[in-house]
Amino acid sequence: MTPTSSKILEEKIGYKFKNEELLREALTHSSFANEQKIRKCRNYERLEFLGDAVLELASSKFFFLNHPDMLEGEMTKLRSSTVCEQALAFCAKDLSLGEYIHLGKGEEATGGRDRDSIISDVMEALIGAIYLDSGFEEAESFILKYVLSDLETKQLFYDSKTILQEKIQKRGQNIHYEIIEESGPDHDKQFTVEAYIDDKAVGRGVGRTKKSAEQQAAYAVLIEWEK
Protein backbone atom coordinates (compact mmCIF):
# COMPACT_ATOMS: atom_id res chain seq x y z
CA MET A 1 0.00 0.00 0.00
CA THR A 2 1.37 3.41 -0.96
CA PRO A 3 0.61 6.52 1.12
CA THR A 4 -2.17 8.81 -0.03
CA SER A 5 -1.11 12.25 -1.25
CA SER A 6 -0.37 14.71 1.55
CA LYS A 7 -2.26 17.32 -0.50
CA ILE A 8 -5.46 15.43 0.27
CA LEU A 9 -4.60 15.49 3.98
CA GLU A 10 -4.11 19.27 3.81
CA GLU A 11 -7.56 19.62 2.26
CA LYS A 12 -9.06 17.33 4.90
CA ILE A 13 -7.67 19.27 7.88
CA GLY A 14 -8.16 22.68 6.26
CA TYR A 15 -4.54 23.72 6.65
CA LYS A 16 -2.02 24.44 3.85
CA PHE A 17 1.62 24.16 4.83
CA LYS A 18 3.92 26.99 3.83
CA ASN A 19 6.88 24.64 4.29
CA GLU A 20 5.78 21.36 2.73
CA GLU A 21 8.94 19.62 3.94
CA LEU A 22 7.60 19.87 7.50
CA LEU A 23 4.50 17.91 6.52
CA ARG A 24 6.58 15.28 4.73
CA GLU A 25 8.80 14.91 7.80
CA ALA A 26 5.76 14.58 10.09
CA LEU A 27 4.45 11.71 7.96
CA THR A 28 7.75 9.82 7.62
CA HIS A 29 8.46 6.83 9.85
CA SER A 30 12.06 5.98 10.72
CA SER A 31 11.77 2.67 8.82
CA PHE A 32 11.15 4.58 5.58
CA ALA A 33 13.86 7.15 6.29
CA ASN A 34 16.40 4.37 6.90
CA GLU A 35 15.60 2.77 3.53
CA GLN A 36 16.40 5.94 1.57
CA LYS A 37 19.90 5.38 0.20
CA ILE A 38 20.23 8.38 -2.10
CA ARG A 39 18.77 11.28 -0.14
CA LYS A 40 18.88 11.80 3.60
CA CYS A 41 15.30 11.75 4.79
CA ARG A 42 14.15 13.00 8.19
CA ASN A 43 11.61 11.05 10.24
CA TYR A 44 8.86 12.35 12.52
CA GLU A 45 10.46 11.66 15.91
CA ARG A 46 11.77 15.19 16.62
CA LEU A 47 8.47 16.75 15.52
CA GLU A 48 6.62 14.27 17.73
CA PHE A 49 8.69 15.48 20.71
CA LEU A 50 7.72 19.08 19.98
CA GLY A 51 4.09 18.26 19.22
CA ASP A 52 3.73 16.44 22.54
CA ALA A 53 4.72 19.63 24.39
CA VAL A 54 2.38 21.81 22.30
CA LEU A 55 -0.47 19.36 22.88
CA GLU A 56 0.11 19.35 26.63
CA LEU A 57 0.02 23.16 26.78
CA ALA A 58 -3.06 23.49 24.56
CA SER A 59 -5.01 20.80 26.43
CA SER A 60 -3.98 22.22 29.82
CA LYS A 61 -5.23 25.64 28.75
CA PHE A 62 -8.48 24.12 27.45
CA PHE A 63 -9.31 22.28 30.68
CA PHE A 64 -8.20 25.20 32.86
CA LEU A 65 -10.53 27.63 31.07
CA ASN A 66 -13.47 25.25 30.59
CA HIS A 67 -13.49 23.70 34.07
CA PRO A 68 -12.96 26.61 36.50
CA ASP A 69 -14.05 24.54 39.51
CA MET A 70 -12.01 21.44 38.73
CA LEU A 71 -9.09 20.65 41.04
CA GLU A 72 -5.54 20.29 39.74
CA GLY A 73 -5.48 16.52 40.25
CA GLU A 74 -8.76 16.07 38.38
CA MET A 75 -7.54 18.22 35.47
CA THR A 76 -4.32 16.19 35.29
CA LYS A 77 -6.28 12.94 35.16
CA LEU A 78 -8.66 14.28 32.50
CA ARG A 79 -5.79 15.62 30.39
CA SER A 80 -3.92 12.31 30.64
CA SER A 81 -6.88 10.28 29.43
CA THR A 82 -7.62 12.77 26.63
CA VAL A 83 -4.13 12.84 25.11
CA CYS A 84 -2.95 9.28 25.83
CA GLU A 85 -1.82 6.98 23.01
CA GLN A 86 -5.17 5.28 22.59
CA ALA A 87 -7.08 8.58 22.56
CA LEU A 88 -4.75 10.13 19.97
CA ALA A 89 -4.97 6.99 17.84
CA PHE A 90 -8.76 7.28 17.99
CA CYS A 91 -8.49 10.87 16.70
CA ALA A 92 -5.92 9.88 14.05
CA LYS A 93 -8.24 7.17 12.73
CA ASP A 94 -10.98 9.78 12.32
CA LEU A 95 -8.61 11.53 9.90
CA SER A 96 -7.51 8.22 8.30
CA LEU A 97 -4.00 9.42 9.14
CA GLY A 98 -2.48 5.99 8.60
CA GLU A 99 -3.13 6.30 4.86
CA TYR A 100 -0.65 9.18 4.57
CA ILE A 101 2.35 7.74 6.44
CA HIS A 102 5.58 6.86 4.62
CA LEU A 103 6.59 3.44 5.97
CA GLY A 104 9.45 1.08 5.27
CA LYS A 105 8.60 -2.22 3.60
CA GLY A 106 9.09 -4.24 6.79
CA GLU A 107 6.89 -1.96 8.90
CA GLU A 108 4.27 -1.92 6.16
CA ALA A 109 4.22 -5.72 6.02
CA THR A 110 3.65 -6.02 9.78
CA GLY A 111 0.63 -3.70 9.89
CA GLY A 112 2.37 -0.52 11.01
CA ARG A 113 -0.08 1.68 9.14
CA ASP A 114 -2.84 0.73 11.59
CA ARG A 115 -0.75 0.47 14.75
CA ASP A 116 -1.92 2.80 17.54
CA SER A 117 1.63 3.57 18.68
CA ILE A 118 2.60 4.82 15.21
CA ILE A 119 -0.49 6.80 14.23
CA SER A 120 -0.66 8.49 17.64
CA ASP A 121 3.00 9.53 17.25
CA VAL A 122 2.26 10.91 13.78
CA MET A 123 -0.68 12.86 15.20
CA GLU A 124 1.71 14.58 17.64
CA ALA A 125 4.28 15.11 14.87
CA LEU A 126 1.62 16.79 12.73
CA ILE A 127 0.84 19.15 15.62
CA GLY A 128 4.56 19.93 15.95
CA ALA A 129 4.81 20.58 12.22
CA ILE A 130 1.86 22.99 12.23
CA TYR A 131 3.39 24.79 15.24
CA LEU A 132 6.71 25.31 13.43
CA ASP A 133 4.94 26.32 10.21
CA SER A 134 2.52 28.87 11.67
CA GLY A 135 2.86 29.13 15.46
CA PHE A 136 0.86 28.14 18.51
CA GLU A 137 -2.49 29.61 17.46
CA GLU A 138 -2.79 27.42 14.34
CA ALA A 139 -1.59 24.34 16.23
CA GLU A 140 -4.09 25.03 19.01
CA SER A 141 -6.87 25.42 16.44
CA PHE A 142 -6.02 21.99 15.00
CA ILE A 143 -5.98 20.44 18.49
CA LEU A 144 -9.34 21.96 19.42
CA LYS A 145 -10.90 20.71 16.19
CA TYR A 146 -9.45 17.22 15.99
CA VAL A 147 -8.38 16.22 19.52
CA LEU A 148 -10.50 18.15 22.01
CA SER A 149 -13.78 18.06 20.09
CA ASP A 150 -16.71 15.75 20.95
CA LEU A 151 -14.98 14.78 24.18
CA GLU A 152 -18.06 13.09 25.60
CA THR A 153 -18.04 10.43 22.87
CA LYS A 154 -14.26 10.03 22.98
CA GLN A 155 -14.25 9.81 26.77
CA LEU A 156 -16.87 7.08 26.57
CA PHE A 157 -14.65 5.15 24.17
CA TYR A 158 -11.25 5.30 25.82
CA ASP A 159 -12.64 5.04 29.36
CA SER A 160 -15.24 2.44 28.38
CA LYS A 161 -13.91 -0.40 30.54
CA THR A 162 -13.75 1.81 33.63
CA ILE A 163 -17.18 3.37 32.99
CA LEU A 164 -18.78 -0.03 32.38
CA GLN A 165 -17.12 -1.51 35.48
CA GLU A 166 -18.54 1.29 37.65
CA LYS A 167 -22.06 0.83 36.20
CA ILE A 168 -21.90 -2.93 36.72
CA GLN A 169 -20.74 -2.59 40.33
CA LYS A 170 -23.66 -0.27 41.11
CA ARG A 171 -25.98 -3.00 39.86
CA GLY A 172 -24.33 -5.57 42.10
CA GLN A 173 -23.22 -7.61 39.10
CA ASN A 174 -19.90 -8.88 37.80
CA ILE A 175 -18.20 -8.48 34.43
CA HIS A 176 -15.39 -10.41 32.81
CA TYR A 177 -13.87 -10.72 29.34
CA GLU A 178 -13.00 -13.85 27.38
CA ILE A 179 -10.96 -14.26 24.21
CA ILE A 180 -13.16 -16.21 21.79
CA GLU A 181 -10.88 -15.99 18.75
CA GLU A 182 -7.21 -15.29 18.07
CA SER A 183 -5.88 -15.02 14.53
CA GLY A 184 -2.89 -13.81 12.53
CA PRO A 185 0.88 -14.27 12.91
CA ASP A 186 2.67 -13.38 16.15
CA HIS A 187 3.74 -9.96 14.86
CA ASP A 188 0.23 -9.03 13.72
CA LYS A 189 -2.29 -10.73 16.02
CA GLN A 190 -6.00 -9.96 16.05
CA PHE A 191 -8.08 -10.76 19.12
CA THR A 192 -11.87 -11.12 19.35
CA VAL A 193 -13.17 -10.67 22.90
CA GLU A 194 -16.61 -11.18 24.39
CA ALA A 195 -17.78 -9.23 27.45
CA TYR A 196 -19.86 -11.20 29.93
CA ILE A 197 -22.09 -9.83 32.68
CA ASP A 198 -22.94 -12.58 35.16
CA ASP A 199 -22.00 -15.18 32.51
CA LYS A 200 -24.25 -13.62 29.85
CA ALA A 201 -22.51 -12.42 26.66
CA VAL A 202 -23.36 -8.74 26.18
CA GLY A 203 -20.79 -7.26 23.81
CA ARG A 204 -18.00 -8.15 21.40
CA GLY A 205 -14.83 -6.32 20.40
CA VAL A 206 -11.92 -6.84 18.01
CA GLY A 207 -8.44 -5.41 18.41
CA ARG A 208 -4.73 -5.96 17.82
CA THR A 209 -4.19 -6.38 21.56
CA LYS A 210 -6.31 -8.04 24.23
CA LYS A 211 -6.70 -4.68 26.00
CA SER A 212 -7.89 -2.95 22.83
CA ALA A 213 -10.39 -5.72 22.10
CA GLU A 214 -11.74 -5.55 25.66
CA GLN A 215 -12.10 -1.78 25.32
CA GLN A 216 -14.04 -2.24 22.09
CA ALA A 217 -16.30 -4.84 23.73
CA ALA A 218 -17.04 -2.55 26.70
CA TYR A 219 -17.76 0.33 24.32
CA ALA A 220 -20.22 -1.86 22.37
CA VAL A 221 -22.10 -2.60 25.60
CA LEU A 222 -22.29 1.08 26.59
CA ILE A 223 -23.50 2.13 23.14
CA GLU A 224 -26.19 -0.57 23.24
CA TRP A 225 -27.35 0.63 26.66
CA GLU A 226 -27.65 4.20 25.39
CA LYS A 227 -30.06 3.24 22.61
Image: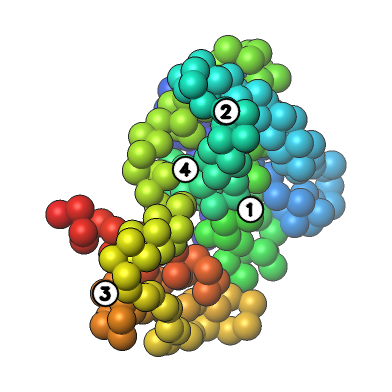
Residue at point 57%, 28% (across, down):
71
Of circles 3 and 2, the one toward us is 2
Find the distance from the CA under tag 3 to the CA under tag 2: 36 Å
Question: Residue beneath label 4, please?
Answer: 91
Question: Residue beneath label 1, please?
Answer: 118
Q: Earlier in the sequence, mark 1 or mark 3?
A: 1
Crowding near pointer 2: few (<14 within 10 Å), some, many (20+)? Answer: few
Specify the quadrant that holds the C terminus: bottom left
Q: Compared with residue 151, is residue 182 higher up or lower down, i.e. above or below? A: below
Find the distance from the CA under tag 4 to the CA under tag 2: 26 Å
Left or right of residue 173: residue 165: right
Mark number, residue 71 = 2
Q: Quadrant of residue 26?
A: top right
Q: In the displayed orientation, state which residue is furthest to the left.
A: 227
Mark number, residue 202 = 3
Q: Are marks 1 and 3 in contact (CB under 8 Å)?
A: no
Secondary structure of the residue carrying numbered label 4: helix
Q: Position of residue 152 (x, y in %)?
A: 36, 39
Q: Earlier in the sequence, mark 3 or mark 4?
A: 4
Q: Position of residue 72 (x, y in %)?
A: 62, 29
Secondary structure of the residue carrying numbered label 2: loop
Q: Earlier in the sequence, mark 3 or mark 2?
A: 2
